Amino acid sequence: MESRAVQSSSRFDLVKWLVVFVLVAAGVVGNQYFSSESVLYRVLALVALGVVAAYVALQTDRGRRFATLLKEARVEIRKVVWPTRPELVQTTVIVVVFVLVVSLILWGMDSLISWLVAGFIG
């Protein structure tokens, strides 16, 4: 019994994804067809089609799982401990100094190798 429910759900999901595809294709074709119209109207139509397509996509199993993933990601982002301004400045200064030191070392090695190669070649 349960496999039938999953199978019928996937059939309807396939139809829903087909509707999403048709809506996106209609937006692309419509944007080309109405290229002489104002950009504002075309953008508004594309946004409306995008909202409808997203709503239909969220009604599928994968869409619901994606929405759950976004909600969980938002919860995890709230748990992040962001650095204070002094920590940020200190870390940035360390990175900049390290990059300068490494670039000077690489410049010195490049100059030395260039000098040696020029000495051998003549």
Image (spheres, helix red, strand yellow):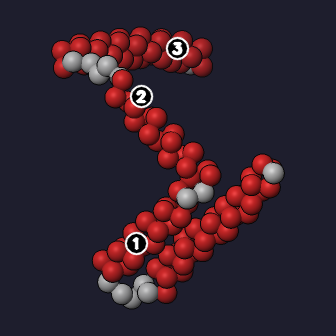
Residue for point 23% across, 14% down? 87
Q: As displayed, is residue 63 above or below residue 106?
A: below
Query: Which residue, given by chain and number where applicable, does mark 3 sit on?
Result: 113
> Which residue is at the far front?
1
Q: For the residue labelled by badge 2, is the local secondary structure a helix, a strand or a loop? A: helix
Residue for point 56% across, 52% down? 63
Q: As displayed, is residue 120 above or below residue 57?
A: above
Q: CA distance from mark 2 to mark 1?
A: 30 Å
Residue for point 39% across, 69% down? 47
Query: Which residue, given by chain and number where applicable, does mark 1 sit on?
Result: 48
Q: Nearer the viewer, mark 3 or mark 2?
A: 2
Viewer-closest of 94 and 121: 94
Q: CA distance from mark 3 to mark 1?
A: 61 Å
Decide which of tag 3 and tag 1 comes sooner along the chain: 1
Amino acid marked by disc 3: Ile
Which mark is drawn over residue 76?
2
Using the rendered image of the protein, determine whether residue 108 is visible from the camera's viewpoint. Answer: no
Q: Residues within 10 Å of mark 3 (few under 14, many from 20)?
A: few
Amino acid marked by disc 1: Ala
Answer left or right for 97 relative to 84: right
Viewer-closest of 112 and 10: 10
Q: CA distance from mark 3 to mark 2?
A: 50 Å
Viewer-closest of 23 and 8: 8
- Residue 31 placed where, x, y %? 46, 79
